[in-house]
Amino acid sequence: MEQLQLERDIEKYFSDLKTLEEMRKKKTKGVTIVHINKNLLNTTHPCRVETEDGKVWYCKSVKFLGNTEMKFKPDNPRPCGARLWLETGFPVEMEDPKTYSEVRK
């Protein structure tokens, strides 16, 4: 009986881990995320903006048009590696938005 319970506990543990990993990889819907891409720090477009529809833009500056929350999660970074970022559910204005390939030219 104990063996069966142990097997269930192990199965649940790995199931929970899988669910957490899937949640971490999912895009946050309805939220725009902004951070600085340190690899582009010496370019004219270091601000990385991930819009609520999942598109990624790089720009010179970002103006937030509503409440914004700063998050610092060194133990749980974003999939892109960012540990510090800004999140807002409001629109943002980007100065000269470009794609990654346009910035790297």
Image: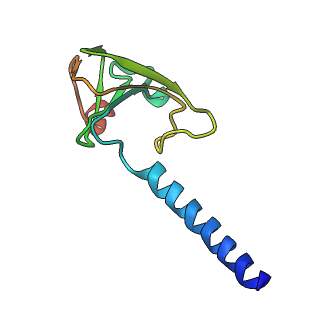
Q: Quadrant of the N terminus?
A: bottom right
Q: Residue at x 54, y 31 (%)?
A: 83
Q: Quadrant of the C terminus?
A: top left
Q: Residue at x 33, y 18 (%)?
A: 44
Q: Is residue 32 above or below residue 5?
A: above
List x then y, in percent, for residue 6.
Answer: 74, 76
Q: Quadrant of residue 49?
A: top left
List x then y, in percent, for residue 2.
Answer: 79, 81
Give whichever of 67, 104 is nearer the camera.
67
List x then y, in percent, for residue 21.
Answer: 52, 56
- Seen as rendered, the residue at the extreme front is 1
Q: Residue at x 30, y 42 (%)?
A: 29
List x then y, in percent, for residue 69.
Answer: 42, 21
Q: Residue at x 33, y 16 (%)?
A: 67
Give whichever of 35, 5 is nearer the camera.
5
Give whichever of 48, 10 is nearer the camera.
10
Residue 105 visible somewhere in the drawing: no
Q: Quadrant of residue 30?
A: top left
Residue 21 visible somewhere in the drawing: yes
- Seen as rendered, the residue at the extreme right is 2
